């Protein structure tokens, strides 16, 4: 496989969906699982589907995974997840995204040098909670070390047409605006003179404990109408 390809280890619901989305986006994906039935199903979608116990270093090495650019470890069992990540590191792989089932699991993977660790249930819960709070599409992605990426629309008239330097977003919310999408155009990075327009879609990095306060600056909450 070429260096721009992906491997997904573990074909539970999460791993299967990740592999499917990568394939839909035109990427070559190697899928690995020790369950023969899951691999047989996956072989109908992916060109390279391999039955392998990835916790065994020699077996994993024989798959050719060392030639893959990015590996997603989608294993829920903590012991197996740790063993597989250790094997990947030993095989020289550095771009590893690992699924964790709780914060303890995540902390252990982080200490092993796995820089990108996701807890799917927590990330989905955060996203749904913010969408419910603000009645608008909000995407939240935890990037570790207490920070998150946030993507949302701007509809608060109080900040429209005001330059970023006057809003003092960084000092107030520890937030940095990375990109503004406007009418199909991308403004990145914005300058201190850049101002918002209604309907802008912004992406910003923020301390995770200040996300709600930051979103309130960009999004004017709407109250649900009472039924008569």
Image: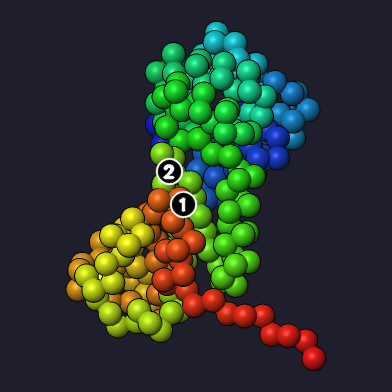
| Near-viewer residue (120 or 157) | 157
Q: Is residue 188 found left or right of 118 in the rendered image?
A: left
- Is residue 82 something that shows in the picture? yes
> Is residue 58 depicted above or below 149 in this figure?
above
Quadrant containing the C terminus is bottom right
The residue pinned by badge 1 equals 209
- Residue 24, position in %: x, y? 57, 50
Mark 1 or mark 2: name the one nearer the start of the chain: 2
Relative image position of residue 18 (x, y in whole percent): 60, 42
Q: Residues within 10 Å of mark 1 (few under 14, many from 20)?
A: few
Report if the CB atoms under discs 1 and 2 are less than 8 Å apart: yes
Residue at 63 percent across and 33 percent down: it is 101
Q: Residue 40 or 105: which is nearer the viewer? A: 105
**Quarter of the rendering containing residue 198:** bottom left
Say few, some or many: other residues with alpha carbon within 10 Å of mark 2 (under 14 / 14 to 19 / 20 or more).
few
The residue at the point 27 percent across, 67 percent down is 168
The CA distance from mark 1 to mark 2 is: 8 Å
Q: Is residue 69 visible?
A: no
Q: Secondary structure at mark 2?
A: loop
> 177 left or right of 27?
left
The residue that mark 2 highlights is: 146
């Amino acid at each position: 496989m070429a260096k721009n390809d992906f491997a997904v280890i573990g074909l539970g619901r999460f791993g299967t969906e990740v592999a499917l989305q990568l394939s839909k986006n035109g990427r070559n994906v190697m899928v690995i699982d020790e369950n023969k039935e899951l691999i047989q199903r996956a072989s109908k979608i992916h060109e390279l589907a391999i039955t392998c116990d990835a916790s065994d270093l020699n077996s994993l090495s024989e798959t050719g995974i060392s030639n893959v650019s990015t590996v997603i470890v989608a294993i829920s069992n903590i012991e197996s997840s740790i063993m597989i990540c250790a094997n990947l590191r030993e095989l020289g792989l550095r771009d590893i995204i690992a699924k964790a089932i709780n914060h303890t699991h995540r902390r252990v993977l982080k200490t092993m040098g796995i820089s990108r660790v996701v807890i799917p249930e927590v990330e989905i819960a955060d996203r749904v909670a913010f969408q419910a709070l603000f009645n608008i599409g909000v995407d939240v992605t935890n990037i570790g070390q207490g920070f998150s990426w946030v993507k949302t629309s701007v509809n608060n008239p109080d900040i429209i047409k005001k330059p970023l330097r006057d809003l003092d977003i960084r000092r107030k919310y520890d937030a940095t605006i990375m990109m503004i999408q406007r009418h199909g155009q991308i403004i990145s990075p914005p300058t201190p003179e850049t101002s918002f327009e209604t309907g802008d879609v912004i992406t910003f990095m923020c301390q995770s404990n200040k996300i709600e306060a930051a979103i309130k600056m960009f999004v004017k909450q709407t109250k649900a109408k009472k039924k008569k």
